[in-house]
Amino acid sequence: MITTWHPFREPLRVTLARTLSIALIAGAAVALSTGSLRRWPALSLLMLWPAFGGHWIDLLFLNGLRPRLPHDGTLQRLGRIAVWFAGGIVLATGLQLTLWAVLKQPTLAWLTWSRAGALFVAIELVAHAVLHLRGRPSFYKGQA
């Protein structure tokens, strides 16, 4: 059976609305949990790395790598997890640089490359679980 992959397309305004909302909510959650509500805007800026950047990492897989991989579901899933892991490292690097530039804070020593990759994979798995529960195409259905 031959599977035809269709490129993922979404209007930029939809992407921006979703990812900005995620970043604002995540920034607020971190600000409240650390007792530093005045840092909410800066923390929301940091959260754009996994939210907005994560969208582009997933697009890299969906439109770039997925059509080039064998159509076997296991290989597709492993490829996606590998892209998420590598993308998490890249996004964490950007987050660390932004943290230093905007907040004049030292980098997060606990956020090693392996933790960054694993954390981003976990974030994506949770996000796709929500999509799956809503009946939308997701990693778990092998459709998106």
Image (cartoon, rainbow, N blue to C red):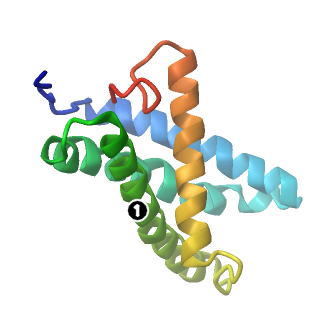
What is the quadrant of residue 15 in the picture?
top left
Question: In the shown orientation, is residue 108 left or right of residue 79?
Answer: right
* 96 versus 30 height, above or below: below
* 56 versus 12 height, above or below: below
Question: In the shown orientation, is residue 18 left or right of residue 70?
Answer: right
Q: Position of residue 138 (x, y in %)?
A: 43, 27
Q: Residue at x 20, y 50 (%)?
A: 65
Q: Nearer the viewer, residue 141 or 32?
A: 141
* 56 versus 71 height, above or below: below
Q: Nearer the viewer, residue 7 or 13?
A: 7
What is the quadrant of residue 119 in the picture?
bottom right
Q: Residue at x 18, y 42 (%)?
A: 70
Q: Position of residue 44 (x, y in %)?
A: 61, 54
Q: Position of residue 7 (x, y in %)?
A: 16, 33
Q: Which residue extends farthest right? A: 35
- The amino acid at mark 1 is Gly
Question: Dot 1 corresponds to which residue?
Answer: 87
Question: In the shown orientation, is residue 37 left or right of residue 99?
Answer: right
* 127 versus 132 height, above or below: below
Q: Residue at x 47, y 70 (%)?
A: 89
